[in-house]
Image (spheres, rainbow, N blue to C red):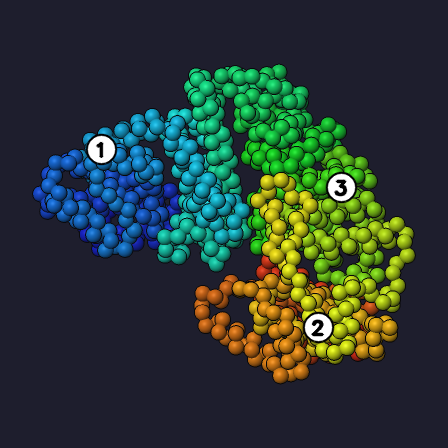
Amino acid sequence: MTDSAEPRTKTTDSGPGGYAAARLRLLQEESRSGPPRRGALAGLTDQWLAALLAGGAETSGITGGVALVAVGGYGRGELSPRSDLDVVLLHDGSADPSALAALADHVWYPVWDMGLALDHSVRTPDEARKTAADDLKVQLGLLDARHLAGDDTLTAGLRTTVLADWRAQAPARLPELRELCQERAERHGELQFLLEPDLKEARGGLRDATALRAIAASWLADAPREGLDEARRRLLDTRDALHLATGRATDRLSLQEQDQIATAVGLLDADALLRQVYESARTIAYASDVTWREVDRVLRARSAGRPRLRGLLGGRGRGGSGSAQTPGERSPLAEGVVEQDGEVVLARAARPERDPVLPLRAAAAAAQAGLPLSLHAVRRLAAAARPLPVPWPPEAREELVTLLGAGESTVGVWDALEAEGLITRLLPDWERVRCRPQRNPVHRWTVDRHLVETAVRASALSRRVGRPDLLLVAALLHDIGKGWPGDHSVVGETIVRDLAARIGFDRADVSVLATLVRHHLLLVETATRRDLDDPATVHAVAEAVRGPGTLELLHALTEADALATGPAAWSAWRGALVADLVKRVAAVLAGEPAPDPDAPQQITAEQERLAIEARRTGGPVLALHARPEALPEALPPGDEAAEPEPIGVELLIAVPDQSGVLAAAAGVLALHRLTVRAADLRAVDLPSELGGTDRGVLLLSWRVAAEYGSLPQAARLRNDLIRALDGSLDIVARLAEREAAYRKYPRRRGVHAPPPRVTVAPGSSQLATVIEVRAQDVPGLLHRIGRALEAAGVTVRSAHVSTLGANAVDAFYVTDAAGTPLAPQRAADVAHEVEQALR
C-alpha cells in the first residue's frame, strides 16, 4: 500500500510500455501538479513495481518470504519527474540464491530499460539493520521505509527495528548527522543566498528538511513546525518544474532556466522565483538552527546526568515565558530578560503586552551576550508585544543601536526576530527587501542580509566616528530603496527620512542619515572612476557631504558597505584611493585653498626616474612590483575573508607622449594574458632640469594579475610594447586569432552579458570631458576602448579603470587637439562611436 491518498492512474499493463505511457500522461496533465502529482506518480510506480515483483516471483518460483520496500524520497511517496527509485528487495533468507537473483533481475531490468535511475539492494532484515548501523545515509533512508508488495510482515518488522535502533542510537548518531549537514553546507553554500542554488544539497535545502524529520523521529527534539511543510513543498514544486523543463535529474536552479521555472510554478519572473526559494530555505535553515541547538542542550543534559528533556519546542514547558521544562539557573541580562541554559529567555515577571520596548531590549541583550534568542521567547514577543509608539521612545532607539553594534552575533538574533515577523513590524519598509536577490555577482548576499552584514562591518569601525549610532543605522538602511523602482539611492533617501523620524531621530540627524543613504556610493565611485587631481572632482564631493562629520561617517559607511558586498568590492588599493579622496575633501571643507590645476602634478621618485629614462631613451620604460595587499581594517578576528589578498602586481610604464599608447599597452598586456584590475594614465611635463622638453611623458600605472601561470618578464613586455608602438606587432590580428580559438569550444562561450554602455558624465571636470564605459570585463577590452578613442581623434588626458567581478567601469578624461573639453555634441558623438566599436 502507498501512503499517498491521491487516486492512482491505472496502467494498461505491467510492462514498461504501459507504465511509460501512463507516466507520460500524468506528467503532461497541467491540472495536476505539486503534492498531488508527486503522490500520483509514486502510486503509479508502486503498481508497476508490484506487478513486476509478482511476475518475477511466478517466474522464479518464489512463493513467499520476500517484500519490495521503497525508501528515501520514494518511501515518503514523493517522486519528482526525474527522481531516483530507491528500492530494497527484502527477503527472509529462505529462498534459493539463484532464484532470488532472477527475481531481482526481473524487477531491476525493466526499470533500467525505462532509463530511470535506480538505487537498489537485496538484503535480509538483519543485513539491512547491519548496513544501517555502518552507514548513516542508509539508516536515514530506511527511516522512510514503505511497503510496496510482497510479505508486509517483513516490511513492518524492518520499520520497527530501524526506528528502535535509531532512537536508541540517536545520542551517538545525531552528532554524526550534524557533521554531514555542516560538510554539505561548506561544499554547496547557503541556498538562501545563491544565484544558482542546489535545491537539495545547499544549506536550507531538501536534505536539511529530511534531517529535521530524522531528528523528530529520534524523539530527542523536534523542529518548529510553523511554515516548515510549506517551505519544503515549495522547494519540491520548484524541483519538479526544473526536472520537466530540463528533462534531467538535476537539483541546480541554473540562471538560464529560472524564467521558465517561474512561469511553470505560477510566478511573475525569475526574481520572484528566487525570492520564494530563498524564503523557503530561510525557514528550513532557521528551523535547523533551533533544532540542533535543542539537540545540543538535550545531549548536554544527558551527559550531566540530568533528567531527559523532551517536548521543549512543542510548548509543553512550564510557564509561558520561554523557560525550559527543567528550570536551570537564571542570570539577569536586562529588564525582563535573563539567560538560561545558554539561551536568552524572558523573565518570569516580564509582561510584553505592557512593555513595547521589550522585543528590542531582549534582542540587544542577546546580541551583546553573544547568545541565541529562545524560540519560545521570540514567539511570545511576537504574539503579545504592543507596537512601539511613533516616534519611538529614546530607549527603543538606543536598544536598536545596541543590537546593531554587537557585531557578528547580531545576525542570528536578527534572523530570529525576522522569522517571527518582528522586523517588519518595527521597520515596515523591510518587507520590500526581505529575501530580495541581487543579480550582480559581486554581491554575495540578498539585499536584507547585505544590510545586516553592513551593520556588522560598521560596528568594527564605530571607534572611527563621532556618531556611531548614525553610522550603524545608515548601514542598516543604506540599500532600503532596492525594494522599489528607480535609483535605489534616491528612493532610499526618501524612505530613510520617514524611517529615521519614525525611529525618533531629530531633524538634524534625519538630514545626515538621508545624506548618507543618498550618497553611500559617492566616495568609492568617485575615487575609482574620477581624476582626484581635478579640483572639480573634490569640490563635487564636498558639496554633496557638506560637513566633516558627515564625511567621516560616509567614509566608514563606504568601507563597511564594500566589505559586506563581497571580496571583489574592496581591496587595499580601493581603500587607499577612497582615503586619498576623503583627505582632499576634508581639506576643502576645512577651508584650505584648492590646489592649482595648472601646477605640475606630484609624482613619486620612481615615476620620476622612469619618466627621465623614457625621455632619455625615447622609448618605453617598465617596472614590475609584486607585493601582498594589506588587510582591510574592519575585518573582525576569525573572519573567513580575513586573509591578505593574492599578491597584486603593480606595473609602471613611462613612455614619451604619443598617440596610441593606451591601446598599445593594453593590447600587449592582453596578449600576455595579464588581467587588468585597475589602471591609471596621466600625462606629466618634466621640469627642464630633469630633461623636460616640449614633449611630455605618459605615466601608466597598472594593477594586473596573471590569467594563467607566472608573470612575463618586464623585458618581454617592453620589447612587445616597442613593436606595438612602431606597428611591427599586429595586436588586433593576434587578439582576433585568440578570440576565434576561444569560441571554438561551446562550453567556453559563457553567459550572455548585457551590451556595453558608454556615456558622457556631465559636470565631472572643468579641464576635460569624462567618457564613462561600462562593459563586461573580457580580455582586450581596454585595448579596444583605447583604439576607439584614438580613432575618434581625441586625446586621453587620464584614465581610471575599475573592475568589479565580471564588470568593468572605466572613465577616460579626454580633450580635443587643443587640450580643451569637447563640445557637448562632439562628446556625445565620441561616446556613441566607442559604444559601437565595443558592440
The answer to which of marks 2 and 1 sits earlier in the sequence is 1
Q: CA distance from mark 2 to mark 1?
A: 79 Å
In the rendered view, tell whether residue 406 sits above or below residue 635.
above
Q: Position of residue 378 (x, y in %)?
A: 57, 28
Badge 2 element:
strand
Residue 126 numbered mark, or none: 1
Closer to us: 245 or 412: 412
Q: Amino acid at mark 3?
A: Arg
Q: CA distance from mark 3 to mark 1?
A: 67 Å
Q: Amino acid at mark 1?
A: Asp
* Residue occupying image coordinates x 42% and y 39%: 180
Badge 3 element:
helix
> Few, some or many C-alpha atoms within 10 Å of disc 2 (few <14, some 14-19, many ≥20)?
many
In the rendered view, tell whether residue 452 sits above or below residue 195.
above
| Tag 3 residue | 464
Q: CA distance from mark 3 to mark 2?
A: 41 Å
* Residue occupying image coordinates x 52% and y 49%: 194
Residue 621 numbered mark, or none: 2
Residues at discs 3 and 2 in contact (Cβ within 8 Å): no
Quadrant (top left/top right/bottom left/bottom right) for the C terminus: bottom right
The answer to which of marks 3 and 1 sits earlier in the sequence is 1
In the rendered view, tell whether residue 508 sits above or below residue 653.
above
Question: In the visual, does 737 lie left or right of 589?
Answer: left
Mark 2 vs mark 1: in front: 2
Residue 435 numbered mark, or none: none
Quadrant (top left/top right/bottom left/bottom right) for the N terminus: top left
